[in-house]
Image (cartoon, helix red, strand yellow):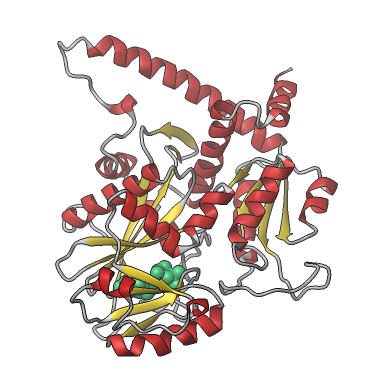
Amino acid sequence: MTSNAAQMVVDAANPHVDPDLRTPVPGTGAEGVEADVRARRKTRDNELMGQVQRLLARMRIAVIYGGNKDEEGSVLYRTHNPRSWKSYEAVASDIADSLRRLGCQHVSLMADDMRLADRLREDDIQFAWLNTGGVQGYCAVSHAPAIMEMLGVPYVGHEPLTAGILDSKHTFKRQLKSFGIPTAKFVTWHAMRGPLNPLCDFDFRLEFGEYKGPYVVKPVSGRASLNVEYVERTEDIPEVAERIFEATQSHVLIEEFLSGREYCVAACGPLIARDGALTRLDGPFTFALVERVLQPDEHIFTSMDKRPITGDRVRPLDPVADEPQVHALHALARQVFVDLNLETLVRLDVRANAEGRLNVLEANPKPDLKAPVDGGVTSLIAEGLAECGMSYDDLILSLIADRLDLVLMQRRGSADHLQALLTNCEA
Ligand SMILES: Nc1ncnc2c1ncn2[C@@H]1O[C@H](COP(=O)(O)OP(=O)(O)O)[C@@H](O)[C@H]1O
Ligand SMILES: [Mg+2]
């Protein structure tokens, strides 16, 4: 794709795109103000590009992946993982390689476990990239960001509270509801409450009314469609819910089954890189729109743990042929990002109901960032980059530059050691 065509894709996708590229309406007096805003932004973006380049070369960065509780010395006492554990080390290594290609001189990989603070101190780490779902426990995705906050190490990743909300589907869905963002009807169940009897449960009847199924019963914290089950009849819910509770020891989500098409869309902060140069949008960047193609009898999308993401299973959306869905997905992703005050990358899983109305299933707080390999297995996000004229390294640069901008400009006093690194470089 030419860079002009790629620019058009980004513009169409993000209607509030880079004001540098918009033409003010003549005769409204807006030209002078626009020109001033543009000039100031340009200056700041040039300054930021310089700062990012210097920091990339100078900062000591750790890319953090999930620690393994079975490894000696990783935890004091082994506990339960409600969310199926994965190390994500291979992807952390892809991210580290990309950072090195972007000019980082000091990049190390570290496991997210009880030795993390010591390792960060020993290696003199000044900045972290969190590619971890945690080692163990009920809010494992929020442990690494919480440790970073405590230690004062700025990082690419969600704040602890946000990470926890995004990884608790029921809590996230309550937030969606409060903002009027469509999501499937649902109730939760926990064994502590006693046996589930949907036919006479007040909350169940209040939520589902006359709806008689089918349903999806799934863990509140999960990944890769593990333990997600399609249930045809109301009377079969308790048995499935009990099985999922047994496996996860946590709340179980019972949702209406949305029978329409399934989509994914990614969203991140407004500062993006193309061909290594930064551009600032005036809203979140929403991209990598794909349809997950379901087979006629496939109710639950088979995860990449079981079948690789290949072209016949994932179809990039066409801005023209799929215009209504493209428009709706960009709007939905923008709304979720803005309303929930998100600050870095998420990937929304979205599914239409029988009438075609899009509903948010979940927002993955740490979407797969496996680097693309020629003709090989890929990730949903990396697949969608070429369409926007971006490479994998551009995405990594976008995410780190966006965070550095946030830390330097909006969190004054929260990264004095990075300011000092800049000042020392400039001296
Ligand atoms: N309410 C629902 N209606 C229809 N399909 C669903 C529903 N909830 C989940 N699914 C299916 O199950 C898959 C996994 O569910 P999801 O909520 O994304 O959990 P996970 O964290 O395992 O990815 C989805 O990709 C979708 O195919
Ligand atoms: Mg999912």
Residue 171 in sight in this render: yes
Spot occupied by residue 317 in the image (x, y as percentages of width and height): 26, 59
Spot occupied by residue 400 in the image (x, y as percentages of width and height): 56, 42
Instruction: Quarter of the image for the C terminus: give it.
Output: top right
Q: Quadrant of residue 126?
A: top right
Q: Quadrant of residue 21?
A: top left
Spot occupied by residue 223 in the image (x, y as percentages of width and height): 49, 71
Spot occupied by residue 31 in the image (x, y as percentages of width and height): 25, 13
Residue under the point 36% across and 70% down = 187
Decide: is 261 above or below 59.
below
Nearer to the camera, 145 or 34 = 145
Residue under the point 52% across and 44% down = 399
Residue under the point 17% across and 12% down = 28
Residue 313 in sight in this render: no
Left or right: 24 as drawn, with respect to 169: left
Decide: is 121 above or below 75.
above
Left or right: 193 as drawn, with respect to 214: right
Q: Quadrant of residue 84?
A: bottom right
Q: How many marks?
A: 0
